[in-house]
Image (tube, rainbow, N blue to C red):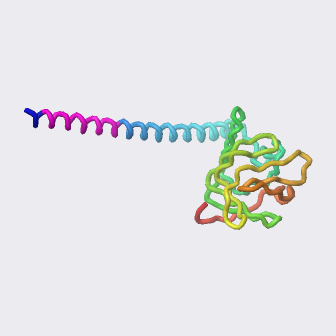
């Protein structure tokens, strides 16, 4: 009798563990489907607006409108998404790449760069690095004022660079990894 109870209890524990793992897997699948659905929805909106004849501004024009230098991103972006309500900017590139600017600075971009776009400032940046001695994640790009001739790039430390180096979008060079 005691053996039978032990066996029943171990079956209960085993089925509880299986049930817990199944819930975790369903949750992961649900999260993946939600992410996929949101991505498809965003791309569909972009295509719909393009077909409707409502062309979005070019990325350089959008950056100019927010008092940022228009050449912060390379010429070869695939597309971008900007949501004014939460100031979220996402820039898509065909592959990881890097750009060398007139001031000898180099910025590397992932295939997707996310940031918050505010007047004169790009913050919370994900997907952008600059070469100091080693590659360092860029977290913020800002201008002190619209008349400022310096761009402040924060990558571990805050460093000023000449604004005119970022006036024109430049060609990028494909790199193997971000």
Q: Main secondary structure of the magenta part?
A: helix
Give the quarter of the figure containing the C terminus: bottom right
Reply above or below: 155 against 4.
below
- Which residue is at a point 33% across and 36% down the rendered structure image? 20
Reply above or below: 147 against 6.
below
Magenta stretch: includes residue 162? no
**Number of numbered callouts drawn:** 0
Q: Is residue 177 left or right of residue 153?
A: left
Q: Quadrant of residue 116?
A: top right
Camera-nearest residue between 168 and 8:
8
Residue 96 location (% of width, % of height): 62, 59
Residue 1 location (% of width, % of height): 7, 32
Question: Range of the magenta residues?
Answer: 5-22
Q: Is residue 85 left or right of residue 111?
A: right
- Which residue is at a point 69% across and 34% down the rendered structure image? 86
Camera-nearest residue between 140 and 47:
140
Q: Quadrant of residue 129?
A: bottom right
Magenta stretch: includes residue 12? yes
- Which residue is at a point 29% across and 38% down the rendered structure image? 17
């Amino acid at each position: 009798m005691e053996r039978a109870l032990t066996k029943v209890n171990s079956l209960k524990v085993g089925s509880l563990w299986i049930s817990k793992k199944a819930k975790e897997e369903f949750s992961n699948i649900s999260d993946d489907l939600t992410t996929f659905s949101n991505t498809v929805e965003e791309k569909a909106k972009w295509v719909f607006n393009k077909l409707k004849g409502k062309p979005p501004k070019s990325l350089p024009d959008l950056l100019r409108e927010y008092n940022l230098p228009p050449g912060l991103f390379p010429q070869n972006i695939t597309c971008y998404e900007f949501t004014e309500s939460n100031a979220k900017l996402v820039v898509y590139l065909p592959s990881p790449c890097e750009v060398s600017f007139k001031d000898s600075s180099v910025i590397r971009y992932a295939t997707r760069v996310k940031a918050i776009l505010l007047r004169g400032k790009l913050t919370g940046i994900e997907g952008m690095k600059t070469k100091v001695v080693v590659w360092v994640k860029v977290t913020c790009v800002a201008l002190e004022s619209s008349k400022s001739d310096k761009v402040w790039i924060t990558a571990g430390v805050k460093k000023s660079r000449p604004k005119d180096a970022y006036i024109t979008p430049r060609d990028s060079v494909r790199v193997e990894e971000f």
